[in-house]
Image (cartoon, rainbow, N blue to C red):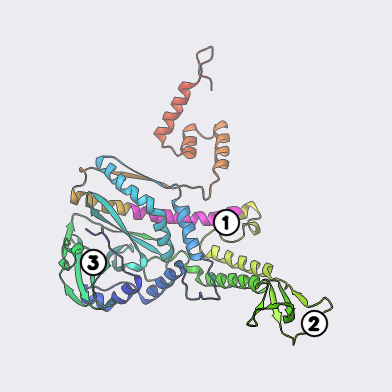
């Protein structure tokens, strides 16, 4: 019943869901400071390649999206989630499979903007999930741990010349989760206007103005909080962008990159020649053999005195080496500020000269990715909780327990080939057992590892004394 929500552009939400309008419509106040609102707009603009400093002379390296994308890729690559324990668990696993298919791109958006809200809803006999970016919802209250306990979403539809807006309010109350829906009609997009009944829009007709879901102790929402301290507004529990501490350096990189492009464009080879060297059209226009290469000079030049003839070549000395070195230095500062290893964005040939430097650099990325995975796992566990509640409400699967096991790939820091060789030697030396070896290198649980080892032993030939040879 909650499908097709959150289609409203962020500029409209920012204007309409100001603190005054929200307080008047829903009797609540948003918990987003002006600092955070401004920062969210900036991070969003950078991610969408429309930063304020970009123009016809300053071109983008698209670093914001590249950083968020690399973190999302590293955090979710080969990620697996097992949901087992009952027929209900099997149903949840099937529904959750769709989440995993979209997870990387959604984590990228969450990392870029500091957070992501995942909101499940029922459609037919399936549980779908809306992914709401950080600048498309407004938190209202938080608990002592900084977790969101109430927030507001918006949905707007245009019919003829009128704009219909629905505000959806979720809040944890004493006896459960309160969900409140209010609809408004306005002749302008940027104002709420007057309140109307929910049945004014067919898609909203089945919604209740107010409902409380009881016997739950958590919101039916899941918030992925990017794991970085909020230094934009230290009093806010909201997350900040993965590149929030490198905004100035990203602007510098764009400017340096633009200087490099201009260096090549302005330094193109040219042949200057007297106008008498070219044919003319009937209207007197010169016919240049190659417009990018040839430049025509009028008779006031001294080119005719050139002993080499009427042509003079101009080939400037390019400064690309110095510009590239400066750009590489800026990229390293961006990598450090974003918790990434040197060489992720910068030239990998110019860094990591020693084994210690390589290890330290990789550990920085490892810490960033590990923290991101922990935050993601926490959000996904909350999402499963909310999905399970809806399964009960709509009777989509039999009652039953479920258990989850998350598996995140660790190849960001661990060289699998090196680890395998080292562990093999430890097994040979008797320092590591075969069960532990299989668990570490094949990703098996203890029971599976023991079973596989038993099968291998059973297949081994016996010697003349009836002993298994190994």
Q: Position of residue 399 (x, y in %)?
A: 20, 43
Q: Position of residue 443 (x, y in %)?
A: 45, 39
Q: Nearer the viewer, residue 230 or 456?
A: 456
Asked whether, in this view, residue 72 is left or right of residue 344, the answer is: left
Q: Nearer the viewer, residue 297 or 337?
A: 297
Structural crowding at the residue carrying mark 1, measured as other residues with C-alpha within 10 Å and reported as few (<14), some (14–19) or many (≥20) = many
Q: CA distance from mark 3 to mark 1?
A: 44 Å
Asked whether, in this view, residue 463 is left or right of residue 387, the answer is: right
Please identify, in this view, whether the residue under mark 3 or under mark 1 is nearer the observer. 3
Please identify, in this view, whether the residue under mark 2 or under mark 1 is nearer the observer. 2
- Tell me the residue at 48%/35% (across/down): 438
Residue lying at the far top of the rendered structure: 464
Q: Is residue 237 visible?
A: no
Q: Which residue has dot 1 on it?
A: 361
Asked whether, in this view, residue 146 is left or right of residue 418, the answer is: left
Q: Which residue has dot 2 on it?
A: 304
Asked whether, in this view, residue 26 is left or right of residue 269, the answer is: left
Q: Which residue has dot 3 on it?
A: 169
Whichever of labels 2 and 1 marks the residue nearer the N terminus, that label is 2
Structural crowding at the residue carrying mark 2, measured as other residues with C-alpha within 10 Å and reported as few (<14), some (14–19) or many (≥20) = some
Q: Position of residue 77 (x, y in %)?
A: 46, 49
Relative to residue 310, is residue 67 depicted above or below?
above
Say which quarter of the image contains residue 398. Answer: top left
| 154 magenta-colored | no
- Tell me the residue at 46%/28% (across/down): 453
- Tell me the residue at 65%/67% (across/down): 325
Q: CA distance from mark 2 to mark 1?
A: 60 Å
Q: Nearer the viewer, residue 210 or 382?
A: 210
Image quadrant holding the N terminus, namely bottom left
Q: Secondary structure at mark 2?
A: helix
What range of the chain is rendered magenta? 358-380
Structural crowding at the residue carrying mark 3, measured as other residues with C-alpha within 10 Å and reported as few (<14), some (14–19) or many (≥20) = many
């Amino acid at each position: 019943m909650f499908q097709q929500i959150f289609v409203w552009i962020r500029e409209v939400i920012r204007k309409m869901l100001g603190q005054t309008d929200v307080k008047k419509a829903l009797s609540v106040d948003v918990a987003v400071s002006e600092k955070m609102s401004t920062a969210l707009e900036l991070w969003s603009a950078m991610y969408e390649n429309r930063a304020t400093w970009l123009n016809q002379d300053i071109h983008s390296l698209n670093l914001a999206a590249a950083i968020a994308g690399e973190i999302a890729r590293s955090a979710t690559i080969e990620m697996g989630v097992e949901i087992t324990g009952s027929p209900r668990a099997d149903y949840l696993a099937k529904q959750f499979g769709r989440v995993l298919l979209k997870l990387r791109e959604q984590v990228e958006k969450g990392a870029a903007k500091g957070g992501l809200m995942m909101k499940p809803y029922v459609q037919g006999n399936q549980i779908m999930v809306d992914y709401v970016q950080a600048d498309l919802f407004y938190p209202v209250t938080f608990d002592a741990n900084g977790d969101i306990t109430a927030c507001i979403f918006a949905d707007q539809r245009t019919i003829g010349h009128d704009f219909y807006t629905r505000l959806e309010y979720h809040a944890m109350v004493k006896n459960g989760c309160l969900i409140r829906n209010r609809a408004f009609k306005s002749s302008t997009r940027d104002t709420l206007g007057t309140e109307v009944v929910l049945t004014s829009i067919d898609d909203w007709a089945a919604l209740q103005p107010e409902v409380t879901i009881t016997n739950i102790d958590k919101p039916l929402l899941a918030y992925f909080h990017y794991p970085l301290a909020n230094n934009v507004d230290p009093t806010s529990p909201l997350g900040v962008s993965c590149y929030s501490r490198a905004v100035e350096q990203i602007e510098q990189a764009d400017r340096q990159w633009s200087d490099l492009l201009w260096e090549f464009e302005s330094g193109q080879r040219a042949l200057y020649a007297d106008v008498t060297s070219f044919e003319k059209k009937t209207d007197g226009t010169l016919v240049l053999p190659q417009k990018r290469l040839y430049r025509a000079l009028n008779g006031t030049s001294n080119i005719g005195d050139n002993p080499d003839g009427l042509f003079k070549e101009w080939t400037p000395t390019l400064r690309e080496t110095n510009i590239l070195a400066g750009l590489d230095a800026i990229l390293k500062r961006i990598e450090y500020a974003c918790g990434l290893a040197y060489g992720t964005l910068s030239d990998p040939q110019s860094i990591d000269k020693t084994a210690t430097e390589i290890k330290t650099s990789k550990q920085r990325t490892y810490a960033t990715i590990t923290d991101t995975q922990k935050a993601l796992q926490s959000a996904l566990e909350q999402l499963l909780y909310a999905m399970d509640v809806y399964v009960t409400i709509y009777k989509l699967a039999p009652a039953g327990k479920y258990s989850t096991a998350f598996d995140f790939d660790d190849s960001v820091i661990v060289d699998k080939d090196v680890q395998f060789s080292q562990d093999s030697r430890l097994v040979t030396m008797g320092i590591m057992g075969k069960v532990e070896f299989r668990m570490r290198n094949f990703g098996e649980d203890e029971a599976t590892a023991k079973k596989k080892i038993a099968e291998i032993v059973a297949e081994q030939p016996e010697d003349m004394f009836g002993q298994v040879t190994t």
